[in-house]
Amino acid sequence: MHNILNSKKITQMAKDLFKEERAKTRVDGWFLAREIVCNKQDEFKNLSKEMRAARELTAILTELPLTISDNAVFAGSQSDAFARSYALINPAFKVETFSGYCDPTAVYNDIEPNDEFTVDRINRVREFAKNSEYVKKLSAVYDAYENYTEEVAFFIEQVTGHIIPDFRPALKYGLKNIISTLDEKISAENDALKKDNFAAIKLTLEATIMLAGRYADIAAKKAATAKGEQKDKFLKLEKTLRKVPGHPAESLYEAIQSYMLLWQVMCLEQAPNPFAFSVGNADRIFEPYRQMSNENREQAAALLKHFLVFFNVGDRSWAISQNLLISGRDTDGNDLTNDTSFALMDAYFDMNLPQPILSVKLHKNSPDILYKELGRFFFSPGVLTPSLFNDDSVFEILKARGVDEADLADYSVAGCQEPLIMGKDNGNTTNSWLNCPKVLELCLNGGYSMITGKEIEKQDTPDALTLLKNIREIFYTTLEKYIDKMCDAANGASRAVAELPVPFLSGFMGGTQSGYDMRDTLNQGTKYNGSGCLIHGLSVMADSFIAIDKLLTERPEDAENLINALKNNFEGYEELHSFLKSAPKFGNNIPEVDNEAAEIAAKISDMVSSHKNYLGNPFRADWASPTTHLTYGYWVAATPDGRVAREQLNYGVDPLYGEASGGMGFRMLSNMHLPFEKMGGGYASHLGVDPKFFTAPDNQGKGADFATRIVKPLFFNDAMKGRISPFYLYVNVTTPETLRKVLAEPKKYAPSGVYIMRIHGTFVNFLDLSPEIQQDIIKRLDLASTTI
Amino acid sequence: MQLKIFGKGFNYSQDGPGNRLVYHLSGCNMHCPWCSNPEGMKPSGSEPPYPIKDIYNEILSSSPMFFEGGGVTFTGGEATLQPKPLLALLKMLKGANINTCIETNGTSPDLPQLFEFLDHLIIDFKHPDSIKLKQITGIGNETIKQNILAAKNYGIDTLVRIPLIGGFNDDCPLDFAEFLKTANAKNLKVEILKYHEYGKDKWKKLGLDYKMQNAFVTDEQVIRLKETLKSNQINIINT
């Protein structure tokens, strides 16, 4: 492409392409896709599930309207796979009304009827969806467990997206080669199910080549009427699309084009819920091709800018939580940062888009230049900040989880922070969600909600003093019962989603070897499999147990009062409230509460991971709360630590905001107590950092100081002496005052309309967020907990 | 034994090298009107005293954060106003190989007794004229000078800090140099701190009158003092 357009022009086109995408206030492609499937229902009704899915995808790829923008240098779009649904970037989002994504047909409310998409037309497809086996099964699960999910003692969901496909073989050998291999397998296979599955995968790969052909025809048509560079560009594009992904890619340009089409098909297969698909180490995926075509850093970055724009859908970048990694190490400790790593950083920095999320894998011997180059991200206001992973720890944790040595370097991040092996791991990462403080509330109130008075699950309760004296035992015993139910429900959701096989994706998740669909609940299609459980409320629990201890030691006569105070949200119990607030809190390097948190984390992680999913594989303990610290906190009454009713829970493994006031040093020390080795499903942690502590004259210097003062003490601290160090962090480097100014005068502080901030594992345009989420970001900066 | 403490927290490189756990000890014998920690001036803060054993344990448990040559720093208020427990704690810390530092106004005649247990000393030299210093802060500089010279002779790593305050000490660079050249040695460095008002709000919150006015100094004044000291071969640093 650089023979036709220089880097500057390619960059400008990428920026214009993004503007075009942001101007789209409707994304209706997903509906068209579902309508195409709806129209084919009679034709496909006698097919096997797998083959039906393959034929449905083929129909979508055949019939979906396609375009190529004049600003594009690549063909392909994922805009037809997503709905305008994701709650947090929806301005109408309200904590008090958000009830999770229980209704799989609710998405049909997100398409606004007009002359083209009439109410009748929408309802017809909605009805078709409602009558599907998938929706029937899933609804049955939600109905059965509604009593528990309504006030979120736990929550469950069917997991779509949240996978890292391995497209490397397709780039390297081409789909035609894979199809040939499948042909051999089909003829050699005796097992009817596998034979059918192989055939279904083959069909979707053929349909992908056909899709490339459709795009090539469009490119040819545009070339016919275009002039000069545009003509040459479209001719080049046509030629490329006739080649990839059917044949091997032999340049960076071809590799990116091939990858984009594969990604598009993967998303369309799961429309309208392909959230949180992730790329993995894009630098390692593309570097071999960059070497073939020998682009320099600037040229590679220019092409990669178009790659990044591809991940943005519509006016608010609705495709959320798509994670892209760079850097990291191999199992021998060799650093794997390459030229494409730096080109990607340049592309990210220059474009500053809301998607895809950038994550950086670090290790003890990460090169200094990497930290220096990261400085510009952390210290430029409104610019995306990458999340950081510690390979040295993640490798050990994954090994303990049973991952083969050879697969370790291929760990990637699904969505926010959950480590999975690219192409080999179906982790069902967001399958179940456990609200520990809600369970504590129920334990303290005989199984009745203190919020609504509703009976969740009645339990015998002794007198207040006995209850408080035995609170740990009572809590853990009760929690076990809730986890049992939660896992049953979660497995039910997984069985429901198995009604929607994914032959195309299975082809890049080990299905061409195993012969099984990756969603099959009876036969394991991927090398690794598990189900996620996001565990909420670690520090609220630790602080609560310690506050109860303090009460029992100093004023046991107030046991009954404590229960009443909680029921009344401390109204009329102000003195007792102050007493509880004054008890030691996690995050201040106070051994008794830090050790309590460590014990809670260890115990609950063990409890969760002793439960089995639909294939008999463990649930994975993931101490993350992607904004659910807000939505779940809303359903939790006052807690013994002094937290008031409906207030948010602590985020991930962090202290509750406002409770750790001793600065970064103490916070990190408390953090070091936690058993990260047991958090195999991941965990979340955030630091709001005041830029004033970094006074180096330039961003490179600040990046180096950031490594010295934050990253290395946290991730690579010799004092951990063989224990597993923390392995995840995201930061927002700013102050509440700055963010308030941005909100008050967006045109002044974010003239482009984009001001990127991090929220849980993803980054988002701060200005796109609903007001409650904006305020949460401001609140949780909690700068007193991070002074340096 | 117990220490009265009114604040603690980590600080990177400004109160000694590396990342340090800094304890603010209650009480001060000077009354500098520009003080940025006025809450530490009174000797009997409302805070409960802490047994030095607890502080010792906290410091030990904090050692994973003593990166880049960090450790613990005792400041104030004025750290040397609680000499016995401070000395005892410093002895314990040296026994545990913890890097130690105190930041002091230098007015304690017993200060040199601590040197054996210190890796770093940060000492203020606020004014070369003892009378003027006494007028404003209540104490002259004779002992301070003796202590700086004692530190030079002992060989302890010493940072002399000059808070440069408009209308107080911004007109006497030659006098600063006059004394500091007598103290000059390899182990001694000097830092100039420009007047700031970070503590102003604290005064108000404590119901105290913040009397400083027009005390900001210009960069030129700082440079003038620096150049004067440098011309006397005094080692100037910025932390």
Image (spheres, grey):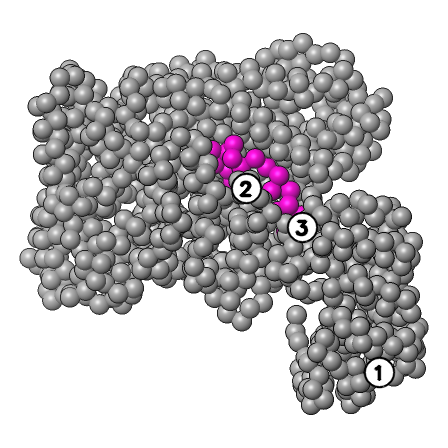
**Within 10 Å of the Cα at label 1, are there few (<14), some (14-19), or many (20+) other Cα atoms?**
many
Label at residue B128: 1
Q: Quadrant of the C terminus of chain A?
A: bottom right
Q: Nearer the viewer, residue A706 or A639?
A: A706
> At 9% across and 34% down in the image, what residue appears?
A180
Q: How many marks?
A: 3
Residue B44 horizontal/vertical position (percent): 92, 54
- Would you name the residue on which mark 2 appears? A722
**In whole angstroms, how far apart are the C-alphas of marks 2 and 1?**
53 Å
Residue A206 horizontal/vertical position (percent): 12, 35
**Mark 2 falls on what kind of element?**
loop
**In whole angstroms, how far apart are the C-alphas of marks 2 and 3?**
16 Å
- Would you name the residue on which mark 3 appears? B63
Magenta stretch bounds? A663-685
> At 60% across and 42% down in the image, what residue appears?
A672
Chain of residue at mark 2: A
